[in-house]
Amino acid sequence: MHTDYVAALDIGGTKIAGALVDGKGGILARAQRPTPATEDGELIMGAVEEVFGELTADPLWGGAVAVGIGSAGPVDATAGTVSPVNVPGWRGFPLVERVRAVTGGLPVTLVGDGVAIAAAEHWQGAARGHDNALCMVVSTGVGGGLVLGGSLHPGPTGNAGHIGHISVDLDGDLCPCGSRGCVERIASGPNIARWAAGAGWRPGADGDATAAAGAAAAAGGDPVATAAFERAAQALAAGIAATATLVEIDIVVIGGGVGRAGEVLFGPLRRRLRDYATLSFVQGIEVVPATTGTDAGLVGAAAATGLGSSRDDDAAVVG
Amino acid sequence: MHTDYVAALDIGGTKIAGALVDGKGGILARAQRPTPATEDGELIMGAVEEVFGELTADPLWGGAVAVGIGSAGPVDATAGTVSPVNVPGWRGFPLVERVRAVTGGLPVTLVGDGVAIAAAEHWQGAARGHDNALCMVVSTGVGGGLVLGGSLHPGPTGNAGHIGHISVDLDGDLCPCGSRGCVERIASGPNIARWAAGAGWRPGADGDATAAAGAAAAAGGDPVATAAFERAAQALAAGIAATATLVEIDIVVIGGGVGRAGEVLFGPLRRRLRDYATLSFVQGIEVVPATTGTDAGLVGAAAATGLGSSRDDDAAVVG
């Protein structure tokens, strides 16, 4: 019988979510606050403390043995600090120490949000049973995390898998990160929409010029919208092929708003992947949609603590 | 007292080298044959058998407990086969099974040659003491291998770290591998020489138009030769930054003929790396020349079997 739980915290630019997660990935209690992203660091920490205030008041809190945090990056798991790009009040903020203080000294594991999503997909989602996987979120930004040799690979600082900021076009457009031709600079939702607009695509009567509207237009046969997704697919394919060529992965799981575009994205992506993933050991990469839902960040933050890491044994028994 | 040795085999396009390697990386016996690269598979295997014929005749052979093979890639450690690009007679050749047969059933570990070099540099060379490293060979081709979390990361098939064939220029020149804009397609010796020739560089009185001659010209201030190395450095920087962003590494070790060009390469490489390695967790990457010598392939093949894997303890005692 499992009576141990993990407290999970998911820090994003718009909300701070917390939960108690059990050994099967079930959510037993939850709390949430909007992220006061433009406020100073202590006010943002106040929202975190309110989330933990609710969780620690829960009768189940006594079973919490660890805390897992997945945060918008970059994070620094070595220093225990976070510096989320979209939360300017937190730069090198000592989140681990502060969370330890409000949770009575529980051990705290910190990873980036892409790493958390990978942990969730590996434990509960489409990467389950795969020892070498890249899990991505293609949305307002492009993020990711890696599973290597059967285990989550957060890297020493918790940031590994940052596929959105590898350059696939070394003379390409400047990226806000300072580099050029990053995957995110080409394939994120806003960049797809920008490319489409630049190529002459105009939204319909509703005025919706987002990538989602572009996806609908592409699905309806609009050639410019189709070309915009083709370009994004090309950049994603080059980045995925690079990842597979560097570390050997056999599956790529893609979630996020753009990831939900369906065949408009997955069709050209699988085709382009054949162009870039040419060496024998990367030719068989599977590309599938993510299956974990909106709680993936929480479930993954919990999984990053090692919760559920006996899942391979479980799977063997079940399968 | 150590009495256990490993038999190492280094398969390249021009030579097949074998050795008995001890637990300190010392070479106790060696044998070598030219690679009959254009002959059929059995003739090539004959050369391997001659190498093992010499090694097994050595009085020290009785102490050999395992065999480590580093081979020109691609390899397939899962199937135990090799398909070296420059050895057309071997396509899916069952080298592991054949070597096991001629060594009396010793356990055989197979990795790609880039992985072997990484193992050697981590054990004996410039990556020693680093838990997360990329080791590269920049020469006729561009290869590499990874150390992650303190251990060699060959990947399931033994090919991980293939940085030469990641695309950093998604619309770039077609690479013989079938992809476009690969690091090797821009930064290998022959491609540097080709770029320089295309930009109008002409060799000196000796007629030497190789990258080595170009490096000498660049060191002497020739602007076209300098630009050729600058372009190669840019591609290497983009590839190295991608690797660090994906898996987190703190050191890059570069060997091979082009790697020996010195500041002509390392100067612009370190500068360009600042352009592409922009995220906080990759800004501190160290770039250094390789220090293992011509035996690196043999020593690394031996290390890939796990020989010397107590080196961290040794280092702690020494350091």
Image (spheres, coloured by chain):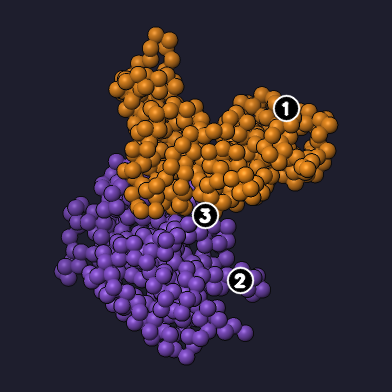
Chain colours: A purple, B orange
Query: What is the quadrant of residue A139 in the picture?
Result: bottom left
Same chain, labels 1 and 2: no
Disc 1, disc 2: CB below 8 Å?
A: no
The residue that disc 2 covers is A310
Whether labels 2 and 3 belong to a single chain: the reply is yes
Q: Residue at x 30, y 62 (%)?
A: A91
Q: Is residue B319 left or right of residue A136?
A: right
The amino acid type, in three-letter code, at marker 1 is: Ala
Q: Callout 2: helix, strand or loop?
A: loop
Q: Position of residue A85 (x, y in %)?
A: 30, 61
Q: Nearer the viewer, residue B102 or B133?
A: B133
Coordinates of residue B271 in the picture (x, y in percent): 33, 38
Residue at mark 2 to residue at mark 3: CA–CA distance: 21 Å
- Which residue is label 3 attached to? A249
Q: Secondary structure at mark 1?
A: strand
> Which residue is nearer to you in this view: A215 or B254?
B254
Judge from the rendering whether residue B118 lies leftward or rightward of residue A229; answer left or right: right
- The alpha-carbon separation of the residues under discs 1 and 2 comes to 47 Å
- Tell which subunit mark 2 falls on: A
Instruction: Report if residue A32 is visible in the image.
Output: no
Determine which quarter of the picture holds residue A294.
bottom left
Residue B302 position (above or below residue A33): above
Residue drawn at the location 56% of the way across and 37% of the way down = B125
Image quadrant holding the N terminus of chain B, namely: top right
Q: What is the residue that sits farthest to the bottom in this orientation?
A: A59
Q: Quadrant of residue B108?
A: top right
Q: Which residue is mark 1?
A: B31
Verify CB contact (< 8 Å) between mark 3 and mark 1.
Answer: no
In the image, residue A250 lies at what x, y percent? 53, 56
Query: Label 3 lies in what chain?
Result: A
